[in-house]
Amino acid sequence: MKITTVFLLNIFILFSSNMLFSQDITFRITGISGVAFIEKSDKSLRVFRGSEIHEGYKLSTESNTTVEITVLKNGNNIGNISLNERSIMMVNSISAEGSYISLSLLYGYFTVNIEDEYQVHTANVSSMVTYNNTPAKVEVAFSEDGSTIVIPINTKVNIYTDNDERTINPREVYIANFDGNNKVVKQGSDTDPLVFLNKGEENARLDSTSTIESLISAMEDISQNDITAVSRVSFTDVDNSEKDIHALEMKKNRMIAGNEGYYSSIVRLINLDSVSKNEMIPYARKSLGLYSANQRAISKMNSALTRTRDKFNRIKRDFDSKMHGASK
């Protein structure tokens, strides 16, 4: 009986420590004007002041709604997120080392102002912000036509896409178009996030059927990503291994954002076309099937990445320990 009690106590301590670790970062609603919901799978809860968004959950706002989120680390206020109307964001898993915050923007527009390292992912762009002893403010928008705009306000931002990697400065803007025509431009009235969203919405709805077909094609590409790339990570070079794993982790978050973001845009466009609703049924079925298939593919990639990250961390700890011992 005593052995069983000790065993259960150890299990309780283990789970308690994991829960405490996962709660180091808190996303708390401290201001809301309008109607918003916290969602995961088939659950949807109305947002009130004091509500918290946990990892894996989405926060969506309706028309004429804005939400202010305070970000807490170990109970201390480290910044805020302002989510605009008709927008959807998601809180991703905290990095294994707890070294950065990870968010995804699935649709719409938000402003992130955090005094820590953080990442923001859309379907086609990963933005990495490094902490430099001052809150780093970045605006990001993801439009209905599948395009992204990233606007650094007071900080440099490292940009990563499938085919591009660069750093942009304040007063510069990174635009990733759905067709892959990515570019850096100067900030101006035409790079305002709301203007960008309105233009993307107009482009998407000029021929909604064509847009839906393009978004479905993009969803098909998500499950075609080579998950075996995770198994090809080499552990012989610590620095390059870390870089490769980090790139794959960002890729996984873009896959998640793409699956969620593209699917929500397809559903929105289908619901808007009341005249051709019967003709849209095949698109609705196909996109739902792809959404589920992509979830399974992403889950497999996540499991493979977790194993690879754990193996790398063990190798790195052993390497660091040996180097420390050799230096004595």
Image: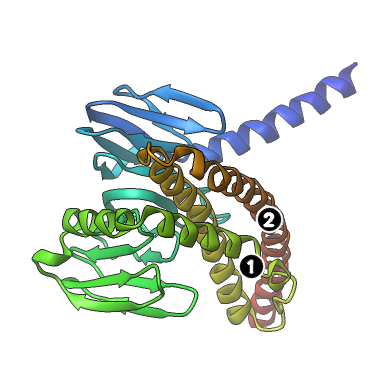
Question: Foreground residue, 328 or 118?
Answer: 118
Decide if residue 103 is on the left or right side of residue 200: right
CB atoms of marks 1 and 2 within 8 Å: yes
Which residue: 49% across, 44% down?
280
**Looking at the picture, how far across and down is residue 160, in whole percent?**
43, 72
Q: Quadrant of residue 234?
A: bottom right
User: Could you say which disc has been placed on residue 147 in the image?
Assistant: none
What residue is shown with label 2? 297
Q: Is residue 283 visible?
A: yes
Place of residue 155 in the rendered image (x, y in percent of width and height, measured from the top left)? 23, 67
The crowding category of the residue bearing disc 2, from other C-alpha atoms within 10 Å (few below 14, some 14 to 19, many at least 20), is some
Number of numbered discs overlaid on the protein picture = 2
Mark 1 closeness class: few <14, some 14–19, many ≥20 residues within 10 Å: some
Q: Earlier in the sequence, mark 1 or mark 2?
A: 1
> Residue 42: x percent and y percent?
56, 28
Q: CA distance from mark 1 to mark 2?
A: 9 Å
* Residue at the farthest left position: 189
Q: Amino acid at mark 1?
A: Asn
What's the coloring here?
rainbow
Rendered-image quadrant of the C terminus: bottom right
Task: Give the answer, above or below, for where 180 lies relative to 217.
Answer: below
- Residue 283 falls left or right of residue 320: left
Tell me the residue that label 1 is attached to: 225
Inspect this view and state whether residue 137 appears. no
From what the image shows, is residue 267 above or below residue 207? above
Which quadrant: the N terminus? top right
Residue 182, placed above or below residue 33: below
- Residue 178: percent from the left, percent from the top? 39, 67
- The residue depicted at 68 percent of the width and 57 percent of the height is 306
Say whether residue 22 is left or right of residue 269.
right
Q: Name the residue nearer the viewer: 309 or 1.
A: 309
